Amino acid sequence: MTRVLVTNDDGINAQGIRKLVEALMTQADLDIYVVAPSEERSGVGHGLTYRSAVLPEAHPFYGYPVKAWAVNGNPADCVKAAFHLLFQEGVKPDLVFSGINVGSNLGRDVYYSGTCSAAREAVILGVPAVALSYDNWYDQENYGEIVTIVQPLLAEFLQQQSRKQLPTDVFWNINIPHRSSQDIQGVAPAVLAMDHYQDVYKREEEGYWLQREYPEHLGQQEREDYRLLQEGYITVTPIHIDATDKALLETVNDWSVIKNWRSGQQ
């Protein structure tokens, strides 16, 4: 049996996580655990709870044959709680799925997204992980054919995991267009679109609200996830958790401050 942990940032009662579990239940020989926030925690990034207690509580999950807990914390807290509090000592999931998020997580969203941060936390703890997001932000109650659409993706990751082909220092960021299965153009490897929107603060009576604008001249490079999603492709982006620029790191030895320091120490 493959042990699968499912989490999200929209909360344990969100429709997206239910759809993800339904899709996973079509796969054979899975032992499914759900550990998700007790309420919505979107946009919290990789925030952790350490100034107050974390209390996982058993939670019913639509009568499905899974074990589920709600956590009074953020998505990264849920993954930590599963590893350190809910599983037996020394027992880890084989694979973590986070989602299915309401709305896409493209480009620099991977740093703000609780969905992506849950997957990143799993990788930090040594387990391969997949973040899944659905581009239905403006149609949030409509998940269309998402269960059918994601099944081949889930099967692919499960097969790769069973063959030990998934790296443990990378999480996979998946974005799915809000289209029928017949209208999806395919699955495409994609780079992050780091400049596809602009932040705009709009003044309201109570203060300023952060919003986004999407100028046409931004985010139009050929392999960017934003562009490919707009064209109807499911995008797949591997995100390495080691963000060190190792090539640039080598040039630091040429800095005058380092050379001067060394000469002064001699």
Image: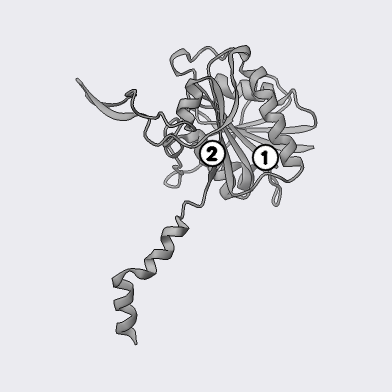
Q: Residue at x 50, y 31 (%)?
A: 9
Q: Which mark is residue 189?
A: none
Tell me the amino acid under the disc marked 1: Leu
Query: Does 192 sit above or below residue 204?
Result: below
Quickly name the residue at label 2: 118
Cβ–Cβ below 8 Å for labels 1 and 2? no
Report how far apart the C-alphas of labels 1 and 2 lie in the structure: 12 Å
Q: Residue at x 47, y 58 (%)?
A: 246
What colouring method underlies this structural image? one colour
Q: Quadrant of residue 217?
A: top left
Would residue 127 appear left or right of 257 to someone viewing this image? right
Q: In the rendered structure, which disc, 1 or 2, sits on the residue that comes first in sequence?
A: 1
In the picture, the quarter occupied by the C terminus is bottom left
**Residue 44 in the image: x percent, y percent?**
42, 36
Q: Quadrant of residue 179?
A: top right
Q: Residue at x 58, y 30 (%)?
A: 188
Quickly name the residue at label 1: 95
**Residue 200 in the image: x percent, y percent?**
27, 27
Which residue reaches farthest bottom? 266
Q: Residues within 10 Å of mark 1 (few under 14, many from 20)?
A: many
Which residue reaches farthest front? 222
Can I make out residue 174 in this image?
yes
Tell me the amino acid under the disc marked 2: Ala
As helix, strand or loop, the secondary structure at mark 2 comes to helix
Could you say which is closer to the camera, residue 86 or residue 30?
A: 30
